[in-house]
Amino acid sequence: MEDNKLIAPMSRIHMVPMDVINGFEVRPGMYEINGATAIPCGVNFTVYSYGATSCELLLYKRMEQEPYAVIPFPESYKIGKVYSMIVFGLNICDFEYAYRVDGPYDPGRGLLFNKKNVLLDIYARAVTGQSVWGIPQNNFYKARVVRDDFDWGNTTQPGIPMEDLVIYELHVRGFTRHFSSGVVNPGTFDGLRERIPYLKELGVNAVELMPVFEFDEMKDFRMVDGRPVLNYWGYNTISFFAPNTSYTAETEFNREGNELKRLIRELNENGIECILDVVFNHTAEGNELGPCFSFKGFDNNIYYMLTPEGFYYNFSGCGNTMNCNHPMVQQMILECLRYWTATYHVDGFRFDLASILGRNEDGSPMSKPPLLQSLAFDPLLGNVKLIAEAWDAGGLYQVGSFPSWNRWAEWNGKYRDDMRDYLKGNYGMWETAARRIMGSSDLYDPEHRGRNASVNFLTCHDGFTLNDLYSYNWKHNEANGWGNTDGSDDNRSWNCGVEGDTDDENVLFLRHKLAKNAFAVLMCSRGTPMFFAGDEFLNTQFGNNNAYCQDNEISWLNWRDREKHKEHYRFCKYMIGFRREHAILRKALLRSRTGYPDMQVMGMDDSSKVLRVVFAGCDEEGQEDMVCLALNVFWERQELYLPSLPTGMGWKIAVDTGKEYLKAGIPEDGALPLAGNSLSMQERSLMVLVADQL
């Protein structure tokens, strides 16, 4: 049977107008397709509002502020709460669009309908007026219809198991904006694409992009000491379905998203997954004093959590809180993630302040949040990574207890805090440190959470960089303009004796050693490691631990540091490769022939100073894999005693951050054989040893 007898292709559907409104031929549209969609005869517009009494479609010439046409939806074009209309003869390259919605205005009940407000389509695939970074948009937002004809070719997604990932968190603009990046299109998706060979050389196999949904960097624009500050990070979403057009090298009229798709395609072709940092916990509309440009105008009392008086709950710390477990909002979020998965081939999502996604409409935590459960079991999302930042700004902290259905992973904030404390010298925390290194089973019971729930990290965009973690005791956020009151005071950092920059060689040696200790232990811990871009060459933010508003050298990566700190870069590259070569660090293998268990802490008690964690196993081909991670965070030398090995096997030194046995901290030509089973460890140092055949 021919295909067209089974289902009529869109190009063969013959639709005829049914009405003429203000000079435009129209007919009822396709109600189940949200947003604006190009079809052969014109454009289908579908929009919904639970409380609206009427809706108008506004058409604009490109970049104009006054509509050239206003087309009201006839009441007969409304089914339930959904308005849908096909407008014939429209060329998507010739117009932009928005809506006006009427209905009751009663702020005390959370109703903000106002026919004067021009509203951005919640399902807009592209937003106008935001294409040039740092230029404020004019008055209101409009949308464009996007032609989705990107050619993915034969590209397949890597599908890397969670335990094999090494996640590299980065800011698209800051990654290449500095002149030292040497790219043709700095600060853009294309600029990042130019740096893919670097990512491959470093060895990471997943990038986690800080927000790339359309946002307004000019929100809360201020001048501080003659310097502009703005919303650089992008955690203030305008449109969940549209890419941030100011991250493109060129304006992509009606093909918005193609540059991002090229980036993702090329990442995938090089074996690198792309994870998006998504912000569903709040929007850029803010609180009672904020603008009304989209969600507020369509259904304020549905999209946001409101107090009984109609004010905004602020569990996000950003003015409003999305009402994620209302059925309409659930549907929107699910459709959004499906869209990015299917249309952009995204490999995973990291959910900012994800505990908000588990709050009920009154703000109370839910034991089985329907949104989180829907995302966990949605078939289209079945292969993407779901990673939660398992806390929010309202005090809900769920690390280890985030509702998961054995599907969600978490940013392990306790790994960060506990390991920071231990690594800076709190040697009495060895038991806690050992649990974190061995996968945090006290937080993530393997029986109920599997073995891939923990995303381990010591640094991320929020807080000190790795360099600053060992260069500053206190935050230095004066450039943000809030009198150094913003940002966390709980940094668990140590300046090694001098605050900030220094020429003291002893202090610098100690700082570099501690940074290597931190990176090495991260790569030798069970769970998925993640680190912040630039940590591999000791990038600094000059002590700023909340650089959300700094679009300048504070946040931009200075690529000259790669040469300045080339020893540290080589060390990090080596440790990533070491993790890749030793599967026992990532997962349990078959039982080791040495008799040692999968993981164990060797011979520790409260008086011990050297923490020894031994990983042992055998792969399916019978190859033995045994690694000993030894940490001396004490301020004096300690003797390291290694476990005995069967006859014919011996220990080799693979890492020595004290640089006593390995001059560069890593081997020049293979791991160094050790005579015997003991050696002296330098103070505040780390060693990694591997068992091998003699």
Image (cartoon, rainbow, N blue to C red):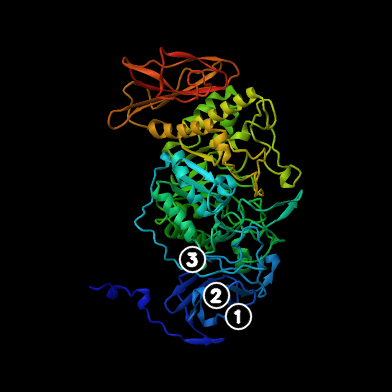
The quadrant in which residue 9 appears is bottom left
Q: Position of residue 685 (x, y in %)?
A: 54, 22
Q: Residue at x 62, y 67 (%)?
A: 141
The quadrant in which residue 244 appears is bottom right
Pick out the residue farthest to the left: 1
**Mark 3 vs 2, N-terminal side:** 2
Image position of 310 with respect to 417: above or below: below
Q: Position of residue 291 (x, y in %)?
A: 68, 64
Which residue bears the numbered disc 1?
68
**Mark 3 and 2 residues: CB-CB less than 8 Å, in contact?**
no
Image position of 621 with respect to 281: above or below: above
Q: Quadrant of the C terminus?
A: top left
Q: Amino acid at mark 3?
A: Arg
Which residue bears the numbered disc 2?
95
Helix, strand or loop at mark 1: loop
Q: Quadrant of the N terminus?
A: bottom left
Q: Residue at x 49, y 83 (%)?
A: 26
Q: Amino acid at mark 1?
A: Tyr
**Mark 1 vs 3, N-terminal side:** 1
Q: Is residue 89 visible?
A: yes
Q: Amino acid at mark 2?
A: Phe
Q: Position of residue 562 (x, y in %)?
A: 55, 37
Which residue bears the numbered disc 3?
255
